[in-house]
Amino acid sequence: MAANLTAGKVEAGQKLEPLAYDVTATTVILGALASRDWRPMHHDRDFAINRNGVRDIFMNTPNLAAWFERYVTDWTGPRGRLGRMKFRMKDSIFPGEQMVFNGTVEKLEKDDVGCTWANLNVEVAVGDRLCTSCAVRVALPADENDNPWERKGDRWRP
Amino acid sequence: MSLPSEVQSWIGQTRYEEETEFPVERGYVWTTCSSVENGNPLFWDDDVAAELTAGPIAPPTMISVWFRPHLWAPGRTKQVQPLQVHFDLKETLDLPEAVMTDNEIIFYDPVRPGDRLKTRQILHSVSEPKTTKLGTGRFWVIEVQYVNQKDQLVAKEMYTGFGYKRGA
């Protein structure tokens, strides 16, 4: 995990370090159960194939959200505070595949109450197959003394 | 094809106001962090959590975890589904399969161990019938709001689902 990233070290167009991870059946099932998702397509291969018409069990969305969070906060450090995430699921991720996360800073902006936001485009792909994209809005500390987690009420506008 | 009046009546209506079945707890936080190898010290180091967030919090993206019901509970005769509006739509529109295509989460006050969250679901829209590579069905948008025991908004979620019948 990075040390605390401050807004001054970020600019539009900046790339986040890629993260590659080999997905196994354990990855899928552990992720589903950690997120209390008991639906059989995330642990029962026969169900996934015969009912859902896909080739295997596949990663569930809530756990993918946790992967996206990890990817973003690995970059920001613990002072980075998520404001908003919008996922677009295009394809599934199956055991035996390597998923790779990539991210780009689309924009850096300061809102009316002085909070600095990085808008990111983050994607997870398997080979050249884009599986999920995620537009992320994350608050960054303006400097080493700033802490976005201290923002409440009207001072927090995600 | 027009929407059944029952479904039409759900649009804009607040439904399924429920309290989560158990308080937010750190065991699930650590299991989730472990499942994605998230080493953020906010969730593992109490000193960091005390300094930055005035005590432990849960990862924001875990918000939907806290309202997924147990698969079984004493006295329960029917399996309860999370996001019940989604399953109501599948059943009422006779669309046996469904996937989520979009999900947006907006985070407000942090969720903390011990919190008892409440949720409510609002159906925003249902599309005309559409055909995709999965089959023919309809898209719908559902909002889920989450508040804590102090009625502070902790998150909002928007789901876009596609319920469908598989192609022949």
Image (cartoon, coloured by chain):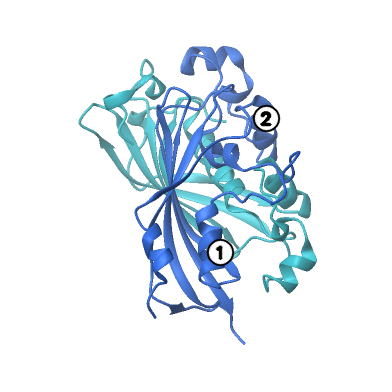
Report which colour depicts chain A: cyan
Is label 2 in a helix, a strand or a loop?
helix
Above or below for B57 versus B60: above
In the displayed structure, does residue B125 sit left or right of residue B54? left
Identify the residue at image location x=43%, y=37%: B155
Above or below for B81 versus B98: above
Q: Quadrant of residue B48?
A: top right
Which of disc 1 and disc 2 is earlier in sequence? 2
Is label 1 in a helix, a strand or a loop?
strand
Q: Which residue is mark 1?
A: B99
Q: Which residue is mark 2?
A: B30
- The answer to whether any part of residue A129 appears in the image is no
Q: How many marks?
A: 2
Q: Quadrant of the C terminus of chain B?
A: bottom right
Q: Quadrant of the N terminus of chain B?
A: bottom left
B45 and B10: which is toward the camera: B10
Where residue A56 appears, as percent x and y from the top left, is: 73, 66
Give the residue type that dot 1 points to.
Val
> Which chain is home to disc 2?
B
The blue one among the chains is: B
- The answer to whether any part of residue A94 appears in the image is yes
In the displayed structure, does residue B92 sit left or right of residue B25? left
The Cα–Cα distance between marks 2 and 1, rounded to whole angstroms, is 28 Å
Q: Residues within 10 Å of mark 1 (few under 14, many from 20)?
A: some
In the displayed structure, does residue A2 sit left or right of residue B10? right
Where residue B134 appears, as percent x and y from the top left, is: 56, 76
Identify the residue at image location x=56%, y=64%: B99
A157 and B111: which is toward the camera: B111
Give the residue type that dot 2 points to.
Trp
> Which chain is home to disc 1?
B
